[in-house]
């Protein structure tokens, strides 16, 4: 291809006369490709935008507590509250109107209801199941996802039953309880159960147990690549598992993934797929975009990402200090998660994003 370089082209002339510059050699700039043409105006930028963020891709995580009265704030998660069941239903109505298709529920169990084996998890009238009933009767079209794990119910704050010497979580005994929880949740109206415990074999056991109980319509969103992360701190404050355990940084490294391990994360996620998961999830999201992107290529299942409490908290904290622009940082964090390959995002920003996109 012939390239014609005009020695007196406007750009060269401009450079040569730029104030303060003196060149010893003539510089000839002629480009066959100019990327900036596609960035020149808002209209062309819109036309070539590859990824976007829409309410239909968002799942709102919501905290529910016992009793009535106004919503209770969570110190480390500005704008996120613990709702009474009645207020939760109200919130769900608004989310559905904003075009958000799903919510994920997290119960704040009264400390008096907690014990070392999390008995409350199998109470058919426990808080989260009362919430599911109330939401499904008031807003039937809204999908309800409920977590399967014991940490909201145990005094030690671990996601499962402890071994008899108390030094580890007992995998198989925990899986049995999770499968029983799945039946209760499915019968009560959860559309998807979401095992967040990282026990081995739980997706397969839950699938088979649901099917045997005539609940084959209930789906499984598997927390497939869930890392042992410091970003869960504010969540543990929100659900009270931190105060039960006496720490926000409970060590879950015998079941949650090592943040260093990419291959192991993909392997675990593919096991969940083989065991019958409908949707795979990566959690946290922002610090694990490489995992999302690799998993996107390794599976054809829909992918979810959980932008967790600490990711939310750090954006708020920096914005409060005036160090980052709140909206721009928030939007960039979410678009990055979409770009890495997430079809859907669990995010505490869900409602405000949906609200802003509408206007
Ligand atoms: C536990 C669970 C956790 C989150 C959701 N389910 C935290 C943990 O492993 O202790 C964290 C969510 C968040 O940080 O927003 N089953």
Image (cartoon, helix red, strand yellow):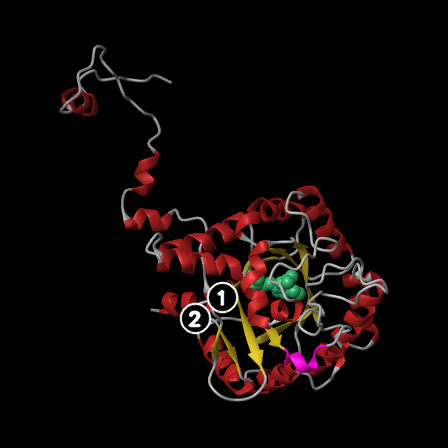
Report the residue marked by disc 2: 79
User: Distance from label 2 to label 1 (Cα)?
Assistant: 9 Å
Q: Nearer the viewer, residue 30 or 271?
A: 271
- Secondary structure of the residue carrying tag 2 is loop
Res 75 seen here: yes
Q: Tell me the quadrant of the picture where the N terminus can be found.
A: top left
Q: Position of residue 58 (x, y in %)?
A: 51, 65
- How many marks the image carries: the answer is 2
Residue 104 visible here: no
Q: Is residue 165 left or right of residue 303?
A: right
Q: Which residue is mark 1?
A: 348
Looking at this view, is 37 or 185 the one in front? 185
Horizontal placement of 249 versus 332: left or right? Answer: right
Residue for point 69% across, 69% down: 151
Q: Quadrant of ligand 1?
A: bottom right
- From the viewer's perspective, is residue 313 above or below residue 18? below
Q: Closer to the camera, 107 or 41? A: 107
x and y, in percent, of residue 235 in the image: 56, 66
- Res. 342 image quadrant: bottom right
């Amino acid at each position: 291809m012939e390239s014609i370089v005009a020695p007196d082209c406007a750009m060269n002339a401009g450079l040569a006369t730029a104030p303060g510059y003196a060149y010893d050699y003539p510089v000839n700039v002629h480009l066959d490709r100019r990327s900036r043409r596609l960035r020149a105006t808002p209209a062309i930028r819109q036309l070539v935008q590859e990824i976007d963020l829409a309410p239909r891709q968002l799942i709102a995580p919501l905290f529910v507590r016992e009793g009535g009265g106004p919503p209770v704030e969570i110190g480390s998660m500005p704008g996120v509250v613990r709702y009474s069941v009645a207020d939760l239903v109200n919130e769900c109505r608004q989310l559905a109107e904003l075009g958000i298709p799903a919510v994920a529920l997290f119960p704040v169990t009264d400390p008096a209801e907690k014990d070392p084996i999390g008995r409350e998890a199998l109470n058919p009238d426990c808080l989260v199941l009362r919430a599911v009933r109330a939401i499904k009767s008031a807003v039937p079209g809204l999908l309800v996802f409920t977590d399967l794990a014991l940490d909201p119910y145990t005094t030690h704050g671990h996601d499962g039953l402890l071994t008899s010497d108390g030094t580890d979580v007992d995998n198989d005994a925990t899986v049995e309880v999770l499968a029983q929880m799945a039946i209760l949740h499915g019968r009560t109206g959860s559309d998807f159960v979401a095992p967040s415990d990282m026990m081995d074999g739980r997706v397969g056991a839950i699938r088979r147990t649901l099917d045997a109980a005539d609940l084959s319509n209930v789906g499984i969103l598997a927390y497939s690549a869930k890392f042992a992360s410091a970003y869960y701190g504010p969540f543990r404050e929100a659900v009270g598992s931190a105060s039960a355990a006496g720490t926000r940084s409970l060590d879950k490294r015998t079941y949650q993934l090592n943040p260093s391990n990419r291959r192991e994360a993909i392997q675990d996620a593919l096991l969940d797929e083989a065991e019958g998961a409908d949707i795979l999830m990566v959690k946290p999201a922002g610090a694990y975009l490489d995992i999302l992107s690799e998993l996107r290529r390794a599976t054809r299942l829909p992918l979810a990402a959980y932008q967790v409490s600490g990711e939310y908290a750090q954006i708020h904290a920096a914005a409060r200090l005036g160090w980052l622009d709140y909206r721009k940082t928030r939007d960039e964090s979410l678009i990055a998660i979409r770009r890495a390959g997430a079809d859907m995002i669990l995010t505490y920003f869900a409602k405000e994003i949906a609200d802003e996109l509408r206007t």
